[in-house]
Image (spheres, rainbow, N blue to C red):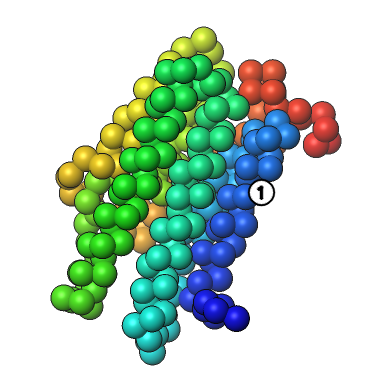
Amino acid sequence: MIGFYDYTVVLTYLSLASGIIGMFCTFTGHMHWSIFCLALCGLFDTFDGKVARMKKNRTEEQKHFGIQIDSLCDIVCFGVLPVAICYHSGMNSLPGAAILIFYCLAGLIRLAYFNVMEEKRQQETAENRKYYQGLPITSIAAILPLIHISAALLQRHFLPVLHVGMLITGGLFILNFKFRKPNNKELAAIIAVVAVVVLYMAVYYKWGGMFRWNWKSLT
């Protein structure tokens, strides 16, 4: 078989599986599980690079494969899945669709640019990256759950906030600015916050009608 199948890429493959399951959940109206899958993708992505770097004898082919497969996975998990979630959450008008197309395109451009620059960086230095250029596409795994958890508070303002949030997030993907890479403590804090949000949505969220969440079918 072609490809690589060792432990350095297993989290990336699991992330893709989670993203696809999240889309299935979206199409069947189980939006809280879609958000859960999105957050799970973010968790897998947080650690896949760390796991890959644990293998000190990776070949150049394995390194390049890891970069490419990670970005290909990211466009599904953090590009297409959020678009599906937002579309089924109410961004199904012409302006909403235009914003979602822009968001996904911006994410794609960012990932392709990252691949080019990351391969160049790895040829020049072995140091870990300290800054990102622009907002990482994986940030949507924290942004979207936080927007959705505020739905009850925002009520009729939820959809405008969702539209603006996705537009700004897409713009930040391709805006050329330095974004400091979070350290381990900051990552742990982000993961903890998102985990609390997702658990709350999965267990206690009762505003099912707003997003066609079928809570009764899961109990």
Question: Percent from the top left, x then y, of residue 164?
Answer: 37, 22
Task: State the image coordinates of residue 129 (x, y, percent, origin top left).
Answer: 24, 65
**Mark 1 secondary-structure assignment:** helix
Q: Residues within 10 Å of mark 1 (few under 14, many from 20)?
A: some
Outermost front residue:
2
Residue 92 visible in the shown view: yes
Task: Tell me the quadrant of the picture where the C terminus can be found.
Answer: top right
Say which quarter of the image contains residue 57. Answer: bottom left
Which residue is located at x 51 percent, y 22 percent? 91
Q: Nearer the viewer, residue 139 or 183?
A: 139
Tell which residue pokes out farthest to the top in this image.
156
- In this orientation, does residue 204 appear? no
**Extreme residue toward the bottom, this view:** 57
Q: Is residue 176 left or right of residue 9?
A: left
Whether 127 is drawn above or below 44: the answer is below
Q: Amino acid at mark 1?
A: Ile
Q: Residue at x 30, y 49 (%)?
A: 110
**Up-down: is 71 above or below 151?**
below
Where 165 falls versus 192 (above or below)?
Answer: above
- List the residue tagged with mark 1: 21
